[in-house]
Amino acid sequence: MTTTLAHANSAVRMRIRHAMYNRGPITVCPGASPIEKAFALAWRSLAGNFPTSQAQIGCARVDFLIEDLVVECDGHMFHSTKEQRAADVARDRYLLERGYRVVRFTGAELHKDALACAEQVKRILDSQAVRLRAQERLHQEMLDFYLGPAVEDWNSFQYYARRKET
């Protein structure tokens, strides 16, 4: 089975390389750079759909938005000087203030293996889902402990907890 998976991954990697370097029938995102096309195709091979590209968040336009995770593909031409890197850091903080996490991949990483980059994004999203489920379980356990199983949501718990304190 691992041989089949390795063969499938190599076929995906070949399609990604083709889309990066050739203008052909594969249309990923209008105006996308080769590294953005590579990431979009790699993501599609994992998730079954293309990520939202060129999403506008406030005054920032991001390369890709997947749930609450912003994926930026940093090519050397636009992200290599001190000023450009400082602007990237400020932009990351702007997005973080608005509740978005940011993952940046360099052009070299995407050229080397876009599929590995997409797999890393998937692992980040999966780990977040696990954390959220654990947090929800903890909240429910707190509700059950303090108020019994009748209280069903966190807002009710906070209301009753405040009333209990006074």
Image (cartoon, rainbow, N blue to C red):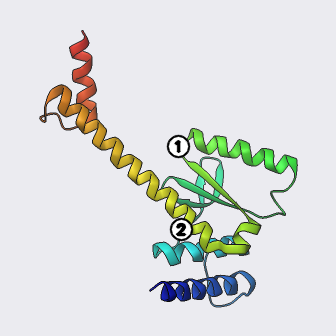
Quadrant showing the C terminus: top left
The answer to whether residue 31 is seen in the rendering is no
**Pointer 2 local density, CA inside 10 Å: few below 14, some 14–19, many at least 20:** many
Question: So how many labels did they put on this image?
Answer: 2
Q: Earlier in the sequence, mark 1 or mark 2?
A: 2
Horizontal arrangement in the rendering, residue 153 relative to residue 107 (left or right): left
Q: Residue furthest top?
A: 166
Residue 16 appears at what percent x and percent y?
A: 64, 82
- Residue at image x 62%, y 86%? 15
Q: Up-down: is 7 above or below 74?
A: below
Q: CA distance from mark 1 to mark 2?
A: 18 Å
Residue 107 appears at what percent x and percent y?
A: 75, 67
- Residue at image x 77%, y 46%? 87
Q: Secondary structure at mark 2?
A: loop
In depth, the one of 70 and 111 nearer the eye is: 111
Q: Secondary structure at mark 1?
A: loop
In depth, the one of 38 and 129 nearer the eye is: 129
- The answer to whether the residue labelled 1 contacts the one labelled 2, judged by CB atoms less than 8 Å apart, is no
> Residue 20 has which mark?
none
The quarter of the picture where residue 29 lies is: bottom right
Would you name the residue on which mark 1 appears?
Answer: 99
Residue type at mark 1 is Gly
Residue 98 appears at what percent x and percent y?
A: 55, 41
The answer to whether residue 115 is seen in the rendering is yes
Q: Up-down: is 40 above or below 54?
A: below
